[in-house]
Image: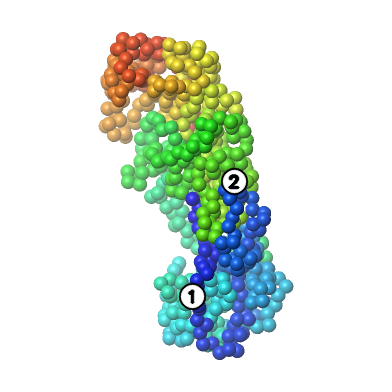
């Protein structure tokens, strides 16, 4: 379920059957100088004895190669000295560390395995992909001179920490140049010299050991390097950040914005200071860019404009969480039909889960021995139950080892979406892969709905914005046993604001009284099977209220505990003129009490059914066709039931149902969501 971490890819490539590397034909004295001036760039390996995670079994460290399991560092690139105190590497070697939660410091390591911490950043150019820096407690007796020019067919050598196994020299030739990819502002060198993971940031040298370029990347067995002349053109005492980024939102796939992320920071600064200031600048830029993206939707955003009317008009009926998304073909907003899988948790507990573009949706039905209040208050308990039903694994020694707990979350805080639903944001840090599990959980009568994203820690800024936005487009059903509703409703602070006024009075075998928004129910044993295990559901959707769009109750459902007997009350909204003829026709059929709303019984799928329009909800003096909303009752009984019995049941139910008051309540008015709260 977790993406590979770019920062740690090197570790996965360290296989025991590596091909021997060619060292080329540098003269011995030159080779010694070059080797002495080049270093591994490393970060500290997480301390496994402090791992907060627990696993299904002990991790098989004996299957990991000896050098890897005993190395206290990960190797991530190469650096080289250009003076007695200054080094150079590629910016993309350092860049992931600027936003990493686990790797907050960086080091160089020499051939004698001595390690020195990166200290001051003296120069940085993101577009040129190069950094100049110093380290603590180390100066250099040997360094590499720079050479400004090079010609096609010249012999060159890549020097770097190939595969993380020490400095390796490899020969090749200059085979041409290519414009740099962003703006073509200068040419990159193309060489035939081989490179491997770990070479990034190392020098490209001529036969005398002079640096003609900085190794940046490899594609199709061609090495690309920044010419030394461009290294010398870096802006003095300034960190220059410049990149082009594409912004989008997964639920609006066709809407993207390409923007330039450009800012500068004064230098020198410490590595730690750069991390702090870069994080602040990038966070502000990302928030501003995404706000601009949502503003650009205009009338195309949900719930504004004609493209939203279909989703507003629809009556949701899914028992699982869904998302409201913009169809990339029709451009209309609609409810998803996510494909859910189910895992048993024991003691009537179940985990239902689905994936939407890498975001995981879970509906956790709590086991009988887990109190609802405990589930609401303990994010570790909730996540441990999730991990019991969903396999999340860590690969060690070639084996996939299942994670059974992430431990206690690193961070928890409340969040409220635009529907007034309270969520608990929880963040778990997984040191072994510098990863984060970002989760939002909200209480429902049967347990929890959780929206979860597994990310690299460097993606936290982006997903701290994006995932709360996903919640603003997430549909949640409130459907559970009567006994579960009795546990749920007293937890007022955990309920959506709209549902805090719901009243439910249940006397087993005798009566059920419910007041929920516009619906009033007063059921007796003749109406339904009134047992603690009977199911009651409130399905929230949308409706028009004057010029506003409101979050509204659209479906009320009651199911017997043992048999497939049930009834539903539906709120049909008057279709907007922009909706297709099928919606207009459907409205007219309800208003004119056409099938199935005739009050006559019919058989379908092994049951007897009967439905009717509820006159008690009609606005007085307004024809049915002109009403803002129509309410229907649909009753289903298993098997073949006589017409007279079905009509008596229908009439009795109609007498127990009615509007909750002269001005039925709805949920909050909606607009395009603001930034995360």
From where the camera sits, is residue 338 visible? yes
- Residue 413 vertical placement versus 373 (above, below): below
Judging by the rendered image, the residue that carries numbered circle 2 is 405
Pointer 1 with pointer 2, Cβ within 8 A: no
Residue 331 horizontal side relative to residue 63, left or right: left
Which residue is at the far right?
A: 137
Q: Residues within 10 Å of mark 2 (few under 14, many from 20)?
A: many
- Residue 58 vertical placement versus 527 (above, below): below
From where the camera sits, is residue 228 visible? no
Numbered tag placed on residue 230 in the rendering? none
Question: Residue 463: x, y in percent?
Answer: 53, 49
Which residue occupies 47% across, 77% down?
Answer: 194
Residue 430 horizontal side relative to residue 173, left or right: right
N-term-proximal mark, 1 vs 2: 1
Judging by the rendered image, the residue that carries numbered circle 1 is 19
Query: Which is more toward the observer, 632 or 372?
Result: 372
Residue 546 horizontal side relative to residue 280, left or right: left
Which residue occupies 59% across, 43% down?
Answer: 426
Q: Quadrant of the C terminus?
A: top right
Query: Which is more toward the observer, 166 or 666?
Result: 166
Query: Which is more toward the observer, 583 or 52?
Result: 52
Question: Residue 515: x, y in percent?
Answer: 50, 19
């Amino acid at each position: 379920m977790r993406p590979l971490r770019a920062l740690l890819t090197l570790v996965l490539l360290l296989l025991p059957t590596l091909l021997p590397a060619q060292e080329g034909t540098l003269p011995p004295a030159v080779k010694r100088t070059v080797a002495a001036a080049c270093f591994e760039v490393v970060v500290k390996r997480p301390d496994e004895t402090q791992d907060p995670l627990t696993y299904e079994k002990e991790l098989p460290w004996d299957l990991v190669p000896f050098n890897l399991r005993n190395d206290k560092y990960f190797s991530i690139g190469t650096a080289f000295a250009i003076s007695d105190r200054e080094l150079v590497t590629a910016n993309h070697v350092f860049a992931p560390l600027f936003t990493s939660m686990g790797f907050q410091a960086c080091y160089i390591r020499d051939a004698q395995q001595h390690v020195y911490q990166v200290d001051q950043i003296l120069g940085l150019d993101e577009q040129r992909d190069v950094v100049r820096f110093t380290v603590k407690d180390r100066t250099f007796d040997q360094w590499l001179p720079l050479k400004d020019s090079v010609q096609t067919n010249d012999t060159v050598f890549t020097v770097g920490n190939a595969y993380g196994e020490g400095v390796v020299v490899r020969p090749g030739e200059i085979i041409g140049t290519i414009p740099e990819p962003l703006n073509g502002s200068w040419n990159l060198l193309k060489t035939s010299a081989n490179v491997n993971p770990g070479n990034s940031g190392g020098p490209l040298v001529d036969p005398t050991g002079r640096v003609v370029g900085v190794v940046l990347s490899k594609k199709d067995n061609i090495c690309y390097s920044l010419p030394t002349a461009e290294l010398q053109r870096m802006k003095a005492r300034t960190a220059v950040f410049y990149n082009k980024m594409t912004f989008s939102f997964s639920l609006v796939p066709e809407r993207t914005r390409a923007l330039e992320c450009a800012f500068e920071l004064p230098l020198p600064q410490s590595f730690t200071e750069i991390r702090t200031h870069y994080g602040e600048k990038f966070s502000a830029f990302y928030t501003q860019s995404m706000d601009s993206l949502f503003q650009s939707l205009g009338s195309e955003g949900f719930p504004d404009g004609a493209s939203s009317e279909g989703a507003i008009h629809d009556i949701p009926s899914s028992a699982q969480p869904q998302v409201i998304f913009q169809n990339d073909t029709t451009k209309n907003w609609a409810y998803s039909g996510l494909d859910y899988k189910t895992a048993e948790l024991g003691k009537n507990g179940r985990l239902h889960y689905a994936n939407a573009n890498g975001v995981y949706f879970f509906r956790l039905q709590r086991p009988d021995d887990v109190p609802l209040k405990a589930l609401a208050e303990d994010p570790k308990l909730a996540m441990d139950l999730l991990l019991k039903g969903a396999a999340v694994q860590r690969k060690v020694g070639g084996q996939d080892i299942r994670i059974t707990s992430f431990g206690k979350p690193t961070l928890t805080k409340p969040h409220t979406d635009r529907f007034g639903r309270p969520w608990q944001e929880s963040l778990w840090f997984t040191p072994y892969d510098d990863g984060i599990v970002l989760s939002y959980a909200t209480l429902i009568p049967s347990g929890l709905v959780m929206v979860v994203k597994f990310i690299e820690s460097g993606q936290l800024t982006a997903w701290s914005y994006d995932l709360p936005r996903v919640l603003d487009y997430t549909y949640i059903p409130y459907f559970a046993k009567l006994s579960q509703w009795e546990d749920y409703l007293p937890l007022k602070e955990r309920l959506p604001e709209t549902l805090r006024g719901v009243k439910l009075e249940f006397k087993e075998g005798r009566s059920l009284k419910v007041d929920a928004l516009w619906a009033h129910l007063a059921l007796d044993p003749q109406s339904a099977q009134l047992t603690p295990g009977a199911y009651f559901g409130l399905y929230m959707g949308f409706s028009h209220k004057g010029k506003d769009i409101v979050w509204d109750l659209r479906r009320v459902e009651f199911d017997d505990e043992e048999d497939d007997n049930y009834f539903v009350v539906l709120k049909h909204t008057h279709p907007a003129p922009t909706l297709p003829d099928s919606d207009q026709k459907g409205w007219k059929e309800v208003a004119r009490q056409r099938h199935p709303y005739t009050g006559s019984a019919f058989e379908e799928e092994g049951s007897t059914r009967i439905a009717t329009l509820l006159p008690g909800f009609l606005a007085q003096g307004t024809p049915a066709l002109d009403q803002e909303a129509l309410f229907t009752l649909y009753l289903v009984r298993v098997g073949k039931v006589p017409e007279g019995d079905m009509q008596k049941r229908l009439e009795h139910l109609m007498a127990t149902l009615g509007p909750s008051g002269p001005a039925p309540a709805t949920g909050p008015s909606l607009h395009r969501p603001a930034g995360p709260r």
